[in-house]
């Protein structure tokens, strides 16, 4: 077991063996994480933004001063949902580009 303070400075028990991905992410340099974040297309960022806004609930800012209060577990769930949505959309975007490339290649081959 590893005891590590959370963002508020409270001790948090973490079993690194139980969550190797979390352990891996904690040991990545900020440059690697920044590179991964920059590789996401603007379309995916927009979809995730709309998804998170839908999960949180959005009121028009010109009429309301919206403040969201939640606990740590619910925020973690929201972030996990956004991350999974981003991963799924990124993979689907890659698939779309692959199909477009293969479609262009097969149409070139059929013109011969």
Image (spheres, grey):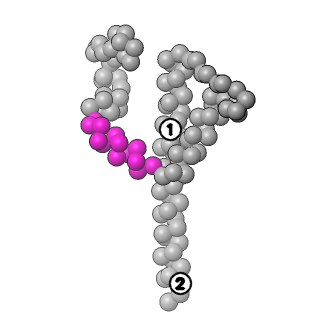
For image coordinates 40% across by 44% down, the residue present is 37
* Snapshot quadrant of residue 55: top right
Q: Looking at the image, which residue sits at the far right?
A: 63
Q: Report the residue marked by disc 2.
A: 110
| Dot 2 alpha-carbon crowd within 10 angstroms: few under 14, some 14 to 19, many 20 or more | few
For image coordinates 48% across by 52% down, the residue present is 41
Q: Main secondary structure of the magenta part?
A: helix
Q: Is residue 20 visible?
A: no
Q: Secondary structure at mark 1?
A: helix
Name the side, left or right, on which 20 lies relative to 102. Answer: left
Q: Looking at the image, which residue sits at the far top?
A: 10
Q: Secondary structure at mark 2?
A: helix
For image coordinates 30% across by 37% down, the residue present is 30
Residue 11, placed above or below residue 88: above
Q: Report the residue marked by disc 1.
A: 84
Q: Position of residue 89 (x, y in %)?
A: 53, 48
Asked whether residue 12 is drawn in magenta, I would say no
For image coordinates 55% across by 51% down, the residue present is 43
Residue 84, placed above or below residue 108: above
Q: How many marks?
A: 2
Name the side, left or right, on which 86 lies relative to 52. Answer: left
Query: Foreground mark, 1 or 2?
Result: 1
Q: Which residues are magenta?
A: 28-40
Asked whether residue 39 is drawn in magenta, I would say yes
Q: CA distance from mark 1 to mark 2?
A: 38 Å
Q: Position of residue 28 (x, y in %)?
A: 28, 36
Q: Is residue 111 visible?
A: yes
* Snapshot quadrant of residue 57: top right
Between 100 and 112, the one nearer to me in the picture = 100
Q: Quadrant of the N terminus?
A: top left
Q: Position of residue 80 (x, y in %)?
A: 49, 31
| Image disc number at residue 97 | none
């Amino acid at each position: 077991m590893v005891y590590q303070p959370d963002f508020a400075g409270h001790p948090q028990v973490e079993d690194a063996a139980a969550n190797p991905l979390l352990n891996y992410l904690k040991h990545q340099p900020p440059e690697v994480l920044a590179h991964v974040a920059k590789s996401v297309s603007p379309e995916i960022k927009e979809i995730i933004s709309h998804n998170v806004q839908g999960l949180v609930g959005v009121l028009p800012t010109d009429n309301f001063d919206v403040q969201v209060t939640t606990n740590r577990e619910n925020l973690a769930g929201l972030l996990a949902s956004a991350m999974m949505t981003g991963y799924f959309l990124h993979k689907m975007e890659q698939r779309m580009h692959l199909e477009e490339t293969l479609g262009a290649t097969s149409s070139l081959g059929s013109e011969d």
